[in-house]
């Protein structure tokens, strides 16, 4: 580590693991050269505190991407990303698809504009494609005319008006602007007798061979599905992927997800655009309003210290709910304020092993979690008091009181727990205590019931990957229903969103509506209060009248 000396005080030291002088980094490769440098990538250390190790990343110098503790496998440059010339030309201005066929950093000007996906897809290099107009798709009544006759509507001349055709299912004939009067089937073709079964379901009949019983009904575009020999096909219409007049096309764009809850041919115009997580906002048949990310406002950016924390806004539709979150998961987060990151050094399995691996096992204690390298091992002395040693076992520590009896402490040690006697002069009060990352109340003269709360923040050792972080990143709550069982943690939706919890992953949450204060059952509206006051006045007048009558 390095830093300026401080007269009569502690110096502020930093340890940049990206510097060649760093021993930790030099060990990362046999040559002693940092692994990022070996592949021409940039190294960045997210936390230069001397106690924060193994939190460096390799970043692409050309293209995008970064990886913790290792070089990026493949850097990519997508010339169709938002804000690029390709995205503006194809998606924003022409409403078409943008495709970058070669995203290597050295390959430039390789983006194409592509027509919406269909059987006649066209593309144009670095310019909007000339897609024409498919009159079978643009005018549903044209397709209905052909489908009613068991035929398919085809527009082979999308740049010429009124050139759509009906085509026989067998491909034996075309007719412009109306159905073919008589479709021909070859001799022995089972569709000559079975075509009516398919046409009644709005499908086409196909006989792939002259073998008996292998004719099948085929879904009529834009529907698709599986075919069964000798029967009507099961067809579906996913309006998010198909091309049709009611389909989504490019409405949702690249940043929102399209979902068709009922992908059936008779269920149309039911697709929605879904905002990316953690937002649960969605819109039927249109782009969703994903709200405002308050982390992009100057107020939040000025508060969260970029060197130690980052900003998160889990609900873009609720104001004043952004948080500052420590870069290292498990060190803390603060709602709408600067966060003080706390590092419980005794949550580190390595430090725990130093104390608990001593004989007898000792406790690890970190009283000041804002200061590094101040954890201690704690040992019980003969009088029941505690002795401590900085960052190492207490010398000369021995079993005290009843724990000195091998048979008693074996009860604890057989359960991989620590034997402690809080009062060596009192008989029968020795206890077994949990060790490691397990927790639970100590038990007198018996093994303790220990478990691990997999949702605890202190179990996180990186920015992502732990249960707490997995749920937190999508604005959900992590819960461990049974701490005696491993790998059963759940992510739960946070009100007003609702949905079933998911085991070891993010839950599927739907928008909820919070009860407005004016609609609360405990808050009558103004009219109700006026009515109450009116009856109260009437009651007082009646009481006065009764008093006068009695006085007379």
Image (cartoon, rainbow, N blue to C red):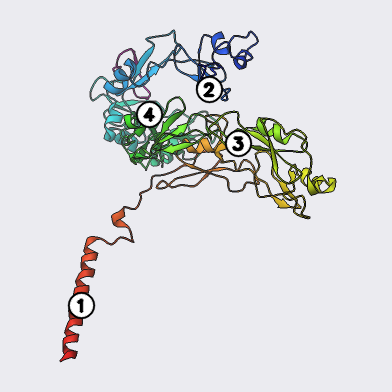
Seen as rendered, the residue at the extreme bottom is: 552
292 or 353: nearer the viewer: 353
Q: Can you identify the residue that label 2 sits on?
A: 8
The mark lying in front, picked from 2 and 4, is: 2
Q: In the structure shown, which secondary structural element does the residue marked by tag 4 occupy? A: loop
Q: Earlier in the sequence, mark 3 or mark 2?
A: 2
The span from disc 3 to disc 1 (Cα, nearest Å) is: 68 Å
Q: Which residues are drawn in magenta?
A: 115-130
Q: Can you identify the residue that label 4 sits on?
A: 255
Q: Residues within 10 Å of mark 1 (few under 14, many from 20)?
A: few
- Name the mark on residue 366: 3
62 or 254: nearer the viewer: 62
Q: Earlier in the sequence, mark 2 or mark 4?
A: 2
Image quarter of the C terminus: bottom left
The answer to whether the residue labelled 3 contacts the one labelled 1, judged by CB atoms less than 8 Å apart, is no
The span from disc 3 to disc 2 (Cα, nearest Å) is: 25 Å
469 or 437: nearer the viewer: 437
The mark lying in front, picked from 3 and 2, is: 2
Image quarter of the N terminus: top right
Q: In the structure shown, which secondary structural element does the residue marked by tag 2 occupy? A: loop
Counting from the top left corner in percent of width and height, residue 533 is at: 21, 69
Q: Can you identify the residue that label 1 sits on?
A: 540
Q: Residues within 10 Å of mark 3 (few under 14, many from 20)?
A: some
Report the label total.
4
Counting from the top left corner in percent of width and height, residue 540 is at: 20, 77
Q: Residues within 10 Å of mark 2 (few under 14, many from 20)?
A: few
Q: Is residue 185 above or below residue 41?
A: below
């Amino acid at each position: 580590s390095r830093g300026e000396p401080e007269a009569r005080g502690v110096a502020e030291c930093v340890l940049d693991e990206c510097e060649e002088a760093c021993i930790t980094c030099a060990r990362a490769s046999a040559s002693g050269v940092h692994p990022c440098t070996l592949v021409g990538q940039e190294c960045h250390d997210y936390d230069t505190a001397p106690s924060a190790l193994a939190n460096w990343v390799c970043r692409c110098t050309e293209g995008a991407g970064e990886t913790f503790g290792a070089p990026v496998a493949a850097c990519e440059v997508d010339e169709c990303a938002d804000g690029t010339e390709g995205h503006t030309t194809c998606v924003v201005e022409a409403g078409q698809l943008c495709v970058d066929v070669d995203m290597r950093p050295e390959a430039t000007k390789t983006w194409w504009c592509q027509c919406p996906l269909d059987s006649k897809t066209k593309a144009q290099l670095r310019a909007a494609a000339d897609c024409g107009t498919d009159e079978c798709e643009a005018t549903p009544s044209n397709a209905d005319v052909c489908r009613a006759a068991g035929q398919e509507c085809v527009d082979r001349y999308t740049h010429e008006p009124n050139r759509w055709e009906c085509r026989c299912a067998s491909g034996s004939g075309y007719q412009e602007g109306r159905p073919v009067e008589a479709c021909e089937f070859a001799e022995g073709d089972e569709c000559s007798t079975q075509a009516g079964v398919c046409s009644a379901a709005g499908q086409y009949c196909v006989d792939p061979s002259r073998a008996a019983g292998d004719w099948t009904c085929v879904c009529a575009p834009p529907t698709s599905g599986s075919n069964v020999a000798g029967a009507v096909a099961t067809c579906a219409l996913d309006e998010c992927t198909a091309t049709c007049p009611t389909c989504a096309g490019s409405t949702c764009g690249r940043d929102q997800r399209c979902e068709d809850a009922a992908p059936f041919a008779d269920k149309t115009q039911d697709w929605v655009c879904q905002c990316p997580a953690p937002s649960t906002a969605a819109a039927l048949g249109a782009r969703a309003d994903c709200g405002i990310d308050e982390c992009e406002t100057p107020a939040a950016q000025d508060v969260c210290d970029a060197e130690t924390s980052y900003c998160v806004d889990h609900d873009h539709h609720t104001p004043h709910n952004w948080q500052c979150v420590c870069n290292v998961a498990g060190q803390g987060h603060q709602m709408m304020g600067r966060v003080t990151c706390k590092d419980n050094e005794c949550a580190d399995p390595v430090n725990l092993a130093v104390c608990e691996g001593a004989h007898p096992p000792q406790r690890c204690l970190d009283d000041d979690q804002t200061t590094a390298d101040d954890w201690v091992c704690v040992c019980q002395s003969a009088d029941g008091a505690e002795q401590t040693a900085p960052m190492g076992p207490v010398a000369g520590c021995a079993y005290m009181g009843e724990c000195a009896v091998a048979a008693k402490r074996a009860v604890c040690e057989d359960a991989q727990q620590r034997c402690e006697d809080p009062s060596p002069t009192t008989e029968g009060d020795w206890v077994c205590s949990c060790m490691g990352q397990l927790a639970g109340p100590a038990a007198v003269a018996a093994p303790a019931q220990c478990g691990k709360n997999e949702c605890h923040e202190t179990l996180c050792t990186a920015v992502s990957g732990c249960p707490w972080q997995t749920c937190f990143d999508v604005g959900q709550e992590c819960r461990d229903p049974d701490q005696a069982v491993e790998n059963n943690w759940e992510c739960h939706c946070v009100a007003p969103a609702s949905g079933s919890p998911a085991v070891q992953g993010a839950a599927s949450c739907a928008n909820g509506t919070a009860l407005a204060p004016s609609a609360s059952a405990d808050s009558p509206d103004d009219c109700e209060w006026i009515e109450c006051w009116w009856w109260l006045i009437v009651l007082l007048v009646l009481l006065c009248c009764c008093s006068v009558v009695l006085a007379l």
